[in-house]
Image (cartoon, rainbow, N blue to C red):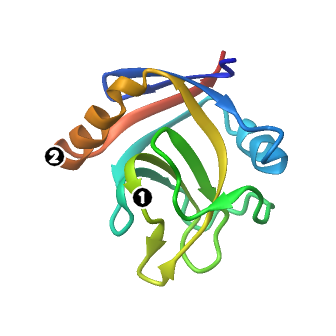
C-alpha cells in the first residue's frame, strides 16, 4: 500500500508509513505534510541523504529505532546528542554523528521506484543538494 508520493531530484517514489511500528513518529511527521525541503548527503553515516531540522522538537522519543536502516527506509532522529533530522538510506548506513553512533525511528519505507534510489544518492553526493517533496497520496 502506498501512502506517500515522494519527488526527490528527478526521481519519483511511492512510500508507506510504518504506522504499526512507529505510530507517534508517523503522526508527528504527517503534520508537516506536504513537505518541501532539500536532501543533502550525510557526513558520517555512509550511503544516506538527510533533511536537517536543526533543534525542532517533534515531541516524540524512540520507537522502532535503528542505527542501520536498509535502503529505502526513512528514519527520524528526534534530537538530543545531535540535531533533529530525517535520514533516507540509499545503501549501507551506520547512523552516526560527530558525537558517535545514533539511532532513529524507522517510520517510512519506499515501496516503488527503488531502482532509482542509488542514482539519487549518487546525484546528491556528486552534484549537491536536491529538492524533495513528500505528500500524502
77 w.r.t. 111: above or below:
below
Residue at the location (61% across, 24% down)? 135
On residue 54, the disc is none
Q: Nearer the viewer, residue 131 or 102?
A: 102
103 sits to left or right of 92: right
Q: CA distance from mark 1 to mark 2?
A: 18 Å
Residue 97: image quadrant is bottom left
135 w.r.t. 62: above or below:
above
89 sits to left or right of 25: left
On residue 126, the disc is 2
107 w.r.t. 131: above or below:
below
Residue 34, percent across and down?
Answer: 62, 28
Sequence order check, earlier mark of 1 and 2: 1
39 sits to left or right of 111: left
Q: Which residue is mark 1?
A: 93
Residue at the location (55% across, 65% down)? 67
Amino acid at each position: 500500500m502506498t501512502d506517500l508520493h515522494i519527488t526527490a531530484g528527478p526521481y519519483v517514489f511511492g512510500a508507506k508509513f510504518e504506522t504499526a511500528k512507529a505510530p507517534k513518529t508517523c503522526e508527528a511527521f504527517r503534520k508537516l505534510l506536504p513537505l518541501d525541503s532539500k536532501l543533502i548527503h550525510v557526513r558520517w553515516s555512509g550511503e544516506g541523504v538527510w533533511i536537517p531540522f536543526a533543534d525542532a522538537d517533534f515531541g516524540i522519543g524512540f520507537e522502532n529505532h535503528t542505527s542501520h536502516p536498509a535502503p529505502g527506509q526513512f528514519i527520524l532522529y528526534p534530537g538530543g546528542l545531535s540535531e533533529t533530522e530525517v535520514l533516507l538510506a540509499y545503501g549501507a548506513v551506520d547512523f552516526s554523528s560527530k558525537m558517535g553512533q545514533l539511532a532513529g525511528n524507522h517510520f517510512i519505507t519506499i515501496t516503488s521506484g527503488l531502482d532509482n534510489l542509488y542514482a539519487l544518492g549518487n546525484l546528491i553526493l556528486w552534484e549537491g543538494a536536491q529538492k524533495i517533496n513528500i505528500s500524502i497520496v
